[in-house]
Image (cartoon, rainbow, N blue to C red):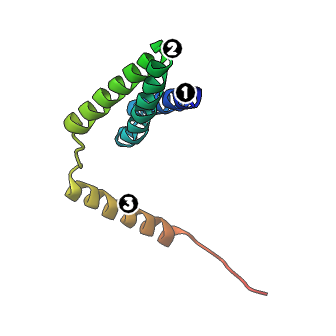
Amino acid sequence: MRKATLILALICSVFAIILAILPLYKLAFIPAILALVFGIISFIKSRKNNQSTHVIQVAFLLVIITLALSTYKTLFTVQEIGDVEELEQRDKENEEKALEELEDLDLDISIE
């Protein structure tokens, strides 16, 4: 049971740190919390059997880094939307250009 929870804690913590680095940083909280839960279970089992807890501490360190990075990105990342009017103007211009190109085409379609 200890090894299984330890492996799950490590896998979840590595997956969480990968998500925290990517633009999907808001999803990193889920595997980080799972890694924390599995790590606590593994830590309790290790302390009960007087076994080493170094690997569990690494998993906890990764979880702390993940939570810090994801929280920082969530709080301080500003997503700006460009000038909507400018985008609409470009869209109209592109549509007009496309219509002009279609009108300039000389199509000869014959159905036999």
Q: What element carries label 1?
A: helix
Callout 2 amino acid = Gln
Pointer 1 with pointer 2, Cβ within 8 A:
yes
Gap in Å between the C-alphas at discs 1 and 3?
62 Å
Q: Is residue 56 above or below residue 72?
A: above
Q: Hey, which residue is sitting farthest bottom in the picture?
A: 112
Mark 2 Cα-neighbour bin, 10 Å: few <14, some 14–19, many ≥20: few
Q: Is residue 102 above or below residue 19?
A: below
Q: Which quadrant of the view contains residue 30?
A: top left
Residue 92 drawn at (x, y percent)? 32, 64
Q: Point out the tag, 1 or 2, that comes first from the N-terminus.
A: 1
**In which quadrant will I find the N terminus?**
top right
Q: Mark 3 points at which residue?
A: 94
**In which quadrant will I find the C terminus?**
bottom right
Q: Point out the tag, 2 or 3, that comes first from the N-terminus.
A: 2
**Residue at 26% in and 34% down:** 71
**Residue at 43% in and 38% down:** 34
Callout 3 amino acid = Asn
Q: Name the residue under label 1.
A: 2
**Label drawn at residue 80:** none
Pointer 2 with pointer 3, Cβ within 8 A:
no
Residue 84 drawn at (x, y percent)? 22, 57
**Residue at 34% in and 42% down:** 26
Callout 1 amino acid = Arg
Q: Is mark 2 on a helix, strand or loop?
A: loop
Q: Mark 2 points at which residue?
A: 51
